[in-house]
Image: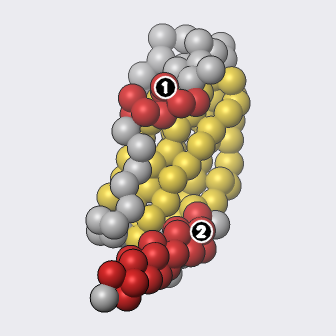
């Protein structure tokens, strides 16, 4: 009985990881730009924006981040992002680095890292 339960849990986990891998290619970076006006930034010099689009045929939950020169990450999330919708990540004094996380909309079996976890793990 324990063997069946363990096999079932592993199968569900593998399916979730496989679905996440397939979906990660569906959030596509389609543009980036430097030095454009940003209402959240005090000056234009060094601003970085990166644009992502949902190319999947289903809604996605997404989290995107852009890195500041001081290595902190500015993080943005969108739940139930519809097909063809877009999301923008920005950094006022950017490095040009960005990251993204994707899962099927409403999939509670997968959790995104918190903003704090992102900065602790990748803010180096």
**Residue 87 in sight:** no
Q: Residue at x 48, y 27 (%)?
A: 119
Q: Earlier in the sequence, mark 2 or mark 1?
A: 2
Residue 60 in the image, given as x and y percentages of width and height:
42, 67
**Where is residue 97, by image quadrant?**
top right
Image quarter in which the C terminus is found: top right
Give the residue number, with chain letter if any, for mark 2.
21
Between marks 2 and 1, how big is the CA–CA gap? 24 Å
Q: Which residue is mark 1?
A: 120
Q: Is residue 67 above or below residue 83?
A: above
Kindly identify the residue that appears in the image at 34 percent across and 66 percent down: 109
**Which label was assigned to residue 91?**
none
Q: Secondary structure at mark 1?
A: helix
Quarter occupied by the N terminus: bottom left
Residue at 37%, 55% (x, y): give it.
Answer: 111
Q: Nearer the viewer, residue 124 or 84?
A: 124
> Quick check: can you spot residue 60?
yes
Q: Quick one: 4 or 68, which is closer to the camera?
A: 4
Is 12 drawn above or below residue 30 in the view shown? below
Disc 2 secondary structure class: helix
Q: Nearer the viewer, residue 61 or 20?
A: 20
Across the whole image, how many numbered discs are drawn on residues?
Answer: 2
Task: Report x, y in % for residue 14.
Answer: 52, 75
């Amino acid at each position: 009985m324990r063997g069946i339960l363990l096999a079932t849990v592993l199968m569900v986990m593998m399916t979730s990881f496989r679905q996440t891998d397939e979906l990660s290619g569906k959030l596509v970076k389609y543009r980036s730009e430097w030095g454009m006006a940003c209402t959240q930034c005090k000056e234009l010099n060094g601003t970085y924006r990166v644009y992502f689009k949902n190319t999947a045929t289903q809604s996605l939950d997404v989290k995107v981040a852009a890195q500041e020169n001081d290595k902190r990450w500015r993080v943005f999330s969108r739940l139930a992002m519809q097909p063809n919708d877009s999301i923008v990540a920005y950094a006022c004094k950017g490095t040009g680095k960005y990251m993204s996380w994707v899962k099927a909309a409403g999939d509670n079996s997968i959790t995104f890292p918190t903003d704090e976890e992102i900065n602790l793990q990748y803010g180096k």
